[in-house]
């Protein structure tokens, strides 16, 4: 069976809390080359993905994308000491006496506002989604391989038929060619003898 180097596979796994989607695109490459797009993955999951792809494929360039629909929780923490220092500095400054500040003005001041984002571990669902995506990628490459196989067989059949026709007509073509050359040779000799 022929397998194409080009293919696409997707796998989706859902739990109560979230849904994880894994997409893999592959193109031709002499070696196994794996790159990641989108979601920042934990190291152990990234290693698992690399190992699974290397187990299944000998060659190809693979682009892996994993993402989820989990809404991250954000918590905010204000540095009270920094706020007091900022107020004191603004009060003693001539330029800022009548200035009213908003949160949007304060968020860019380093150390004043800390935002923490909670992330869910997607490793378990990510591995399941990956295995489904790999299975679908293999099927995709097999379908493309069947198309390539048909093209190769059609071209091979054409060449085989052309070879057979040429082989059958070769003796008569050779006789015709020899006859043509003899006639040209005789004409040249006659022309040369007349010139004497």
Image (tube, helix red, strand yellow):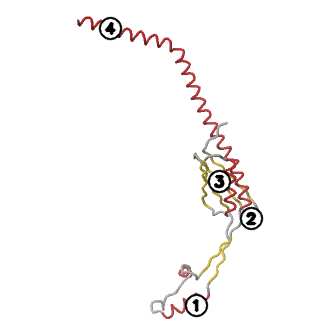
Q: Quadrant of the C terminus?
A: top left
Residue of label 1: 84
Mark 4 vs mark 3, CA separation in Å: 75 Å
Q: Nearer the viewer, mark 1 or mark 4?
A: 4
Mark 1 vs mark 2, CA separation in Å: 41 Å
Q: Secondary structure at mark 3?
A: strand
Q: Nearer the viewer, residue 14 or 175?
A: 175
Mark number for residue 187? 4
Mark 2 vs mark 4, CA separation in Å: 95 Å
Q: Is residue 83 above or below residue 135?
A: below
Look at 58% across and 46% down and name the residue there: 30
Q: If you read the primary sequence from the N terminus, does the residue marked by circle 1 or circle 4 appear first?
A: 1
Q: Is residue 114 above or below residue 144?
A: below
Look at 62% across and 34% down and name the residue there: 149
Residue 115 found in image quarter: bottom right
Q: Position of residue 166 (x, y in %)?
A: 52, 18
């Amino acid at each position: 069976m022929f397998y194409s180097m080009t293919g696409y596979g997707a796998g989706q796994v859902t739990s109560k809390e979230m849904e994880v989607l894994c997409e893999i695109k592959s193109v031709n490459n002499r070696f196994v080359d794996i790159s990641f797009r989108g979601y920042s993955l934990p190291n152990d999951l990234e290693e698992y993905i690399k190992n699974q792809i290397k187990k299944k494929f000998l060659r190809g360039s693979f682009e892996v994308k994993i993402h989820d629909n989990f809404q991250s929780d954000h918590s905010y923490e204000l540095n009270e000491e920094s706020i007091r220092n900022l107020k004191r500095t603004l009060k003693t400054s001539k330029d800022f006496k009548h200035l009213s500040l908003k949160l949007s003005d304060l968020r860019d001041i380093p150390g004043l506002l800390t935002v923490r984002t909670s992330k869910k571990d997607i490793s378990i669902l990510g591995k399941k989604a990956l295995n489904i995506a790999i299975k679908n990628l293999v099927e995709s490459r097999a379908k493309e391989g069947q198309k390539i196989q048909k093209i190769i067989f059609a071209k091979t059949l054409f060449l085989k038929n052309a070879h057979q026709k040429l082989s059958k007509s070769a003796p008569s073509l050779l006789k015709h060619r020899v006859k043509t050359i003899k006639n040209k040779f005789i004409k040249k000799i006659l022309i040369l003898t007349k010139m004497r």
